[in-house]
Amino acid sequence: MPAAPAPVAPRPDAPAPAAPKKLRPTRISGTWVAVLVAIVVLIFLLIFILQNGDNATIHFLWGEFSLPLGVALLFGAIGGALLVAVVGAARILQLRRQAKRTAAPTGRPATSSPARRES
């Protein structure tokens, strides 16, 4: 049987292997985490709606109608989320307009935060 080759010793002048760099999370990985969380939330929401199938009479303005309780609560949650989204979008637009007004002559926004300016 032929002899195994002798192990090669590293040269003393060779650079040591670099430690592997830690990878930073990317936007895509964050999106995948958000998608997985959304799927879990939707599964719980579906279970909630299916378990609360009793009809509830809803009186709104001059109308009266009947919906399953889970669906009625879902509509209420959607209405609340839309209200929060509208208020948040208005605040973002307000901050963008303020940042454009305080932009430096170079066309770049000022470095100080518009929310932290002193009066």
Image (cartoon, rainbow, N blue to C red):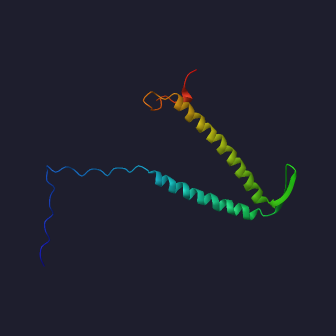
Q: In the rendering, at what x and y percent does residue 9 appear?
A: 15, 58
**Which quadrant is home to the C terminus?**
top right
Residue furthest to the bottom: 1
Q: Residue at x 68, y 48 (%)?
A: 82
Residue furthest to the left: 2
Q: In the rendering, at what x and y percent does residue 29 appear?
A: 47, 54
Q: In the rendering, at what x and y percent does residue 87 appear?
A: 66, 40
Left/right placement of residue 57 relative to residue 98 reads: right
Q: Residue at x 81, y 60 (%)?
A: 67
Left/right placement of residue 35 relative to residue 9 reads: right
Q: How many marks?
A: 0
**Which quadrant is home to the N terminus?**
bottom left
Left/right placement of residue 35 relative to residue 52 reads: left
Does residue 46 lie above or below 59 as drawn?
Answer: below
Which of the 4 image quadrants contains residue 48? bottom right
Q: Residue at x 16, y 51 (%)?
A: 14
Does residue 77 lie above or below 98 as drawn?
Answer: below
Q: Nearer the viewer, residue 44 or 97?
A: 97
Q: In the rendering, at what x and y percent does residue 106 appear?
A: 42, 29
Q: Residue at x 66, y 43 (%)?
A: 86
